[in-house]
Amino acid sequence: MSNPTGDSRSLQTYSRLWKEMKAVTAKLDRIKADIKACEPRVLDFFEKSGIPRTTVRGVTIYVKRDLWAGREEGVTNEVACEALAKAGLGDFAAMRFNTQTLSAYVRECENNGEPLPEEFKGVIKVSETFKIQARKG
């Protein structure tokens, strides 16, 4: 190895910062795991209390509902894409269909009070997820 150039203090600083970053990342991973472990109990709280949100210690906690569309169990991509094409949604289908774009379409239908195409029945499933969200109160 050739003679190093530059300030060896930079190496010391880099080493210290790298160790600090690893420690903070590990702590963040533990915090995320703890939050994930709390989510079922928090969801249960909101379900039982019937309130949409609450603020605790300056943090507003609420449940965010999302709809996601995808193939029904046992339905092939071809069958799903065929159903999309028959429903006039061929833009969502190619060799594979884009679940994020299709999910956005499903959300738009729900927001506008429109029914989903008949061709979806037995082919495209729509499921909802509930995630705990928070923001500064």
Image (spheres, grey):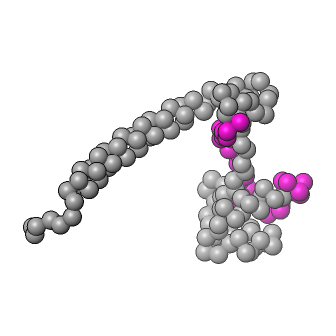
Range shown magenta: 110-137
Q: Is residue 120 visible?
A: no
For the residue pair 46 and 96, the one nearer the viewer reads as 46
Which residue appears at 71% of the width and 48% of the height?
66
Horizontal relation, residue 19 to residue 53: left or right: left
In-image side of 61 versus 115 (left or right): left
In which quadrant will I find the C terminus?
top right
Q: Is residue 32 magenta?
A: no
User: Image height check: is 107 above or below 45?
Assistant: below
Examine the structure image and report whether residue 132 is included in the region drawn in magenta: yes
**Residue drawn at point x = 68 percent, y = 31 percent:** 58
x then y, percent, for residue 101: 70, 65
* Relative depth, front residue between 111 and 118: 111
Task: List x then y, in percent, for residue 78.
Answer: 64, 70
Vertical side of 19 occupied by 107: above or below: below
The one nearer the camera, 27 or 97, is 27
Q: Residue at x 84, y 58 (%)?
A: 109
The mark tally for this picture is 0
User: Which residue is drawn at the image coordinates 74% and 60% (left, top)?
Assistant: 104
Residue 126, how many percent across, how many down?
72, 52
